[in-house]
């Protein structure tokens, strides 16, 4: 992931790669008009899933368009001021996001994304400390399970699950179901101050390896 994005005409960033507007790789579903002004794309992992944020910036008209997961959230066709910021919400939890537009020099612009008031990098670093994420494949379907350690909320494929917690001899267990499968997240002390609590996902009595949040 490249941060921040910098645009100098007539080149633009598309899916984190610098390409020319007349490149043959620029094909549907994007229109040529959109591709000409598409300057930044970010993938943001939240509890309810990974969201794609796209930003168009017309450096002659000042146009600003924000898409979240392909849906248009903000459109301003004419802006006299070419720099500034656009704030919107992402995901089921309405997480606050802000795109900052700053001039570098001449016709060069820098685009940075903030999530909940933090730079994307700092937000993701903090998120890796406050969440656990597991991905598994069952019954022909992929499941992305996220535990928010501060609230003990459990999300799966964009939805917050109903859970039931119970104390056990060596810690706690948070139980929930995925279809006909019994699942729980076990929390036990690591015995080490720096590591804190260790969370493990068990599905049908099988431990599921964690991935990076």
Image (cartoon, rainbow, N blue to C red):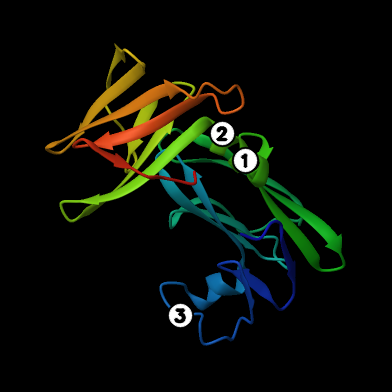
Seen at 64% across and 45% down, the residue is 120
Instruction: Give me the C-alpha separation between circle 1 and circle 3.
Output: 34 Å
- Residue 157 in percent (x, y) is at 32, 43
Seen at 56% across and 73% down, the residue is 35
Reading the chain from its start, which is encountered first: label 1 or label 3?
3
Seen from this angle, which residue lies furthest right?
A: 105
Disc number at residue 27?
Answer: 3
For the residues bearing labels 1 and 2, Cβ distance under 8 angstroms: yes
SS type, badge 2: helix
- Horizontal side of 41 relative to 60 (left or right) equals left
Q: Is residue 131 above or below residue 152?
A: below
Reading the chain from its start, which is encountered first: label 2 or label 3?
3
Which of the image's four quarters has the N terminus?
bottom right
For the residues bearing labels 2 and 3, Cβ distance under 8 angstroms: no
Which of these two is toward me, 102 or 205? 205
Disc number at residue 129?
Answer: 2
Instruction: Give me the C-alpha separation between circle 1 and circle 2.
Output: 7 Å
Q: Is residue 20 above or below residue 35?
A: below
Which of these two is toward me, 118 or 140? 140
Labels 1, 3: front one: 1
Seen at 46% across and 72% down, the residue is 30
Residue at mark 1 = 125
- Horizontal side of 109 relative to 77 (left or right) equals right
For the residues bearing labels 1 and 3, Cβ distance under 8 angstroms: no
């Amino acid at each position: 992931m490249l941060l921040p994005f910098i645009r100098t005409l007539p080149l633009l960033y598309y899916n984190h790669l610098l390409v020319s507007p007349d490149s043959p790789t620029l094909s549907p579903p994007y229109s040529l008009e959109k591709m000409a002004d598409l300057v930044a794309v970010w993938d943001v992992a939240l509890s309810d899933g990974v969201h794609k944020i796209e930003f168009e910036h017309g450096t002659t008209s000042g146009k600003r368009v924000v898409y979240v997961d392909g849906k248009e959230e903000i459109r301003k066709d004419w802006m006299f001021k070419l720099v500034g910021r656009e704030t919107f919400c992402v995901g089921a939890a309405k997480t606050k996001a802000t795109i900052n537009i700053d001039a570098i020099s001449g016709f060069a612009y820098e685009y940075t994304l903030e999530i909940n008031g933090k730079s994307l990098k700092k937000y993701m670093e903090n998120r890796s400390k406050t969440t656990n994420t597991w991905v598994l494949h069952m019954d022909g379907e992929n499941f992305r399970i996220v535990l928010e350690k501060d609230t003990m909320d459990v999300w799966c494929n964009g939805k917050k699950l109903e859970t039931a917690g119970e104390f056990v001899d060596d810690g706690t267990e948070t139980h929930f179901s995925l279809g006909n499968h019994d699942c729980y997240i076990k929390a036990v002390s690591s015995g080490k101050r720096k590591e804190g609590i260790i969370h493990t996902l068990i599905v049908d009595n099988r431990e599921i390896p964690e991935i990076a949040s």
